[in-house]
Image (tube, rainbow, N blue to C red):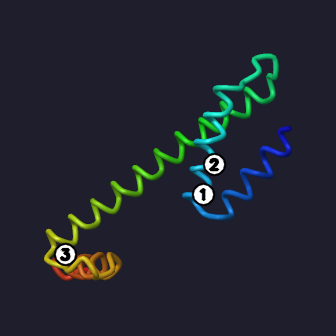
């Protein structure tokens, strides 16, 4: 049963993030309805799956916070949002080095 669960997870993950998350939601809902409390392996697998979902959400929050910070930094420095942050950083570093006499 766990092998089948892992194979289905991998197949849905290969089909893309949205497909994987739909599968996770459906699988967790099914487990909550049909969970066999005597099957410790299955219960552990679903706990781990839940932990992975929480970790995924935290990573998405981190990525969004980074995007927002970068957009704000570009705006405050007077750059267009389409300019690479590498360009913004290089310009700032050059300015600093010139001002510091380095």
Mark toward the viewer: 3 or 1: 1
Q: How many residues crowd around disc 2 within 10 Å: few (fewer than 14), some, or many (20 or more)?
A: some
Tell me which label, 3 or 1, sits earlier in the chain. Answer: 1
Say if 90 sits above or below 45 in the image.
below
Whether tag 1 and tag 2 are in contact, CB under 8 A, the answer is yes
Tell me which label, 3 or 2, sits earlier in the chain. Answer: 2
Residue in view at x 57 percent, y 59 percent: 17
Q: How many residues crowd around disc 1 within 10 Å: few (fewer than 14), some, or many (20 or more)?
A: some
Q: Where is residue 50 in the image (x, y as percent from the top left)?
A: 60, 35
Q: Name the residue under label 1.
A: 19
Is 83 left or right of 18, judged from the image as shown? left
Can you tell which quarter of the image residue 73 is in? bottom left
State the SS at label 2. helix
Residue in view at x 68 percent, y 57 percent: 12
Quarter of the figure with the N terminus: top right
Front-most of residues 69 and 31: 31
Mark toward the viewer: 3 or 2: 2
Q: Name the residue under label 2.
A: 23
Q: Residue pushed farthest top?
A: 38
Front-most of residues 22 and 14: 22
| Mark-to-mark CA distance, 3 and 1 | 52 Å
| Mark-to-mark CA distance, 1 and 2 | 6 Å
Residue in view at x 62 percent, y 42 percent: 26
Q: Where is residue 90 in the image (x, y as percent from the top left)?
A: 31, 80
Say if 7 sits above or below 95 in the image.
above
Residue in view at x 65 percent, y 26 percent: 33
State the SS at label 3. helix
Mark seen at residue 100: 3
């Amino acid at each position: 049963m766990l092998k089948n669960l892992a194979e289905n997870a991998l197949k849905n993950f290969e089909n893309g993030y949205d497909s994987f998350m739909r599968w996770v939601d459906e699988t967790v809902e099914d487990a909550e309805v049909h969970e066999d409390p005597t099957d410790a392996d299955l219960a552990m697998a679903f706990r781990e799956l839940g932990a992975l979902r929480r970790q995924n959400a935290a990573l998405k929050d981190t990525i969004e916070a980074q995007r927002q910070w970068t957009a704000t930094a570009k705006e405050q420095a007077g750059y267009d949002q389409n300019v690479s942050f590498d360009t913004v950083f290089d310009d700032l570093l050059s300015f600093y080095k010139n001002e510091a006499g380095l």
